[in-house]
Amino acid sequence: MKTLVALLAAALVAGCESLSYYSQAIGGHFQLLAAARPIDSWLADPATPADLKTHLETAQRIREFATQDLHLPDNASYTSYADVGRRYAVWNVFAAPQFSVEPKPECFPFTGCVAYRGFFSEQEASRYAEKLRKEGYDVYVGGVLAYSTLGWFDDPLLSTFIRYPEAQVARLVFHELAHQLVYAKNDTTFNESFAVAVEDEGVRRWLASQHRTAELEAFRAGQERKRDFYARVKETRERLKTIYASHLPREAMLEQKRGEFERLRAAFPGVVPAEPNNAFLVSVALYTELVPAFERLLAASGGSLDRFYARARDLAQEGRAQRDAVLARAN
């Protein structure tokens, strides 16, 4: 509660717009927590649908595996369940200048600056996105199935993903718990890439522990397809960086920008949105750019998750320049 009071105080100092934003964030999160009940309560309730009980029992086993085998935080997170009555938990708004592939930072008390702003209301997210577009930013709005409060609260399982395939439920739980384990202030790419590396390794170990060879192979094949896409996005970002730094006339730069996005969309139809832009590239890069570096750190740790986590914690405590230098060598 002290944290919430501090957030509201910061909002009041910052002005009406900030007050509105923090109010929806705090209110949205507490509505979600109010809807949560312990998994055992849902399982004991005769009104709980049978298929939901099956998924919750699987989630319990995944949560136990996260602690015992992956050595992720042992707390009450993901031991309760909430039906939020909507498709996504939150909607994240990413923005980047028209001629830049660097994100517009959004800064908050305690967590520092991140590369997006999250909303519990799709309407509020759309309203903020439109405001940024009018200011000249490229904007991308993405729905998010789950989020982490970094251990400040006991995050519940959500209806937004509980009925997803088992590997996807495991992926989300491992990812969000990883955020509680390691967090570098003001470095979204570090935080998200670390969590993705943990989720990938966690899902591989989970499926292997269940002796589900076919699903494990399918997961690996899916990861390879994703890597191809991520590599193409990275190449597009690098080419756009060069274009944006070229001091070409505005129209010539816009034409080259359009060409890059048309080629990306043609290469990955159905994956890339109809009108991709710099903000879309940002939304992908934040979660993928440093994953290869973290995978190499894990390999250098001999596959020991404890040593890997310790190295990641050390990096999170270092300055941004030192951290980037280490990860660049690992990449």
Image (cartoon, rainbow, N blue to C red):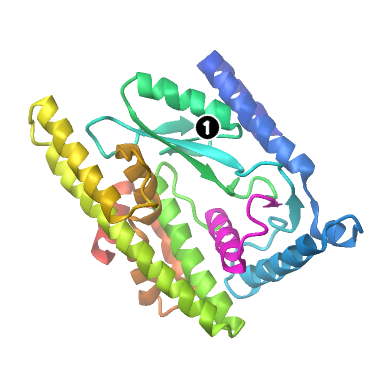
Q: Would you place residue 185 above or below residue 138 in this image? A: below
Q: Does the magenta stretch include residue 170?
A: yes
Q: Where is residue 3 in the image (x, y as percent from the top left)?
A: 64, 34
Query: Magenta residues?
Result: 156-180
Does residue 195 belong to the magenta stretch? no
- Give the residue displayed 77% in from the left and 63% down from the top: 51
Work out whether residue 306 can be spotted: no
Q: Which residue is outermost to the right?
A: 46
30 left or right of 41 in image: left
| Residue 127 appears in the rendering | yes
Quarter occupied by the N terminus: top right
As displayed, is residue 65 above or below residue 184?
below
Main structural element of the magenta stretch: helix, strand or loop?
helix
The kind of residue on which mark 1 rests is Pro
Residue 286, percent across and down? Answer: 38, 49
Local secondary structure at mark 1: loop
Using a 10 Å C-alpha cutoff, classify the residue at mark 1 as few (fewer than 14 neighbours), some (14 to 19) or many (20 or more).
Answer: few
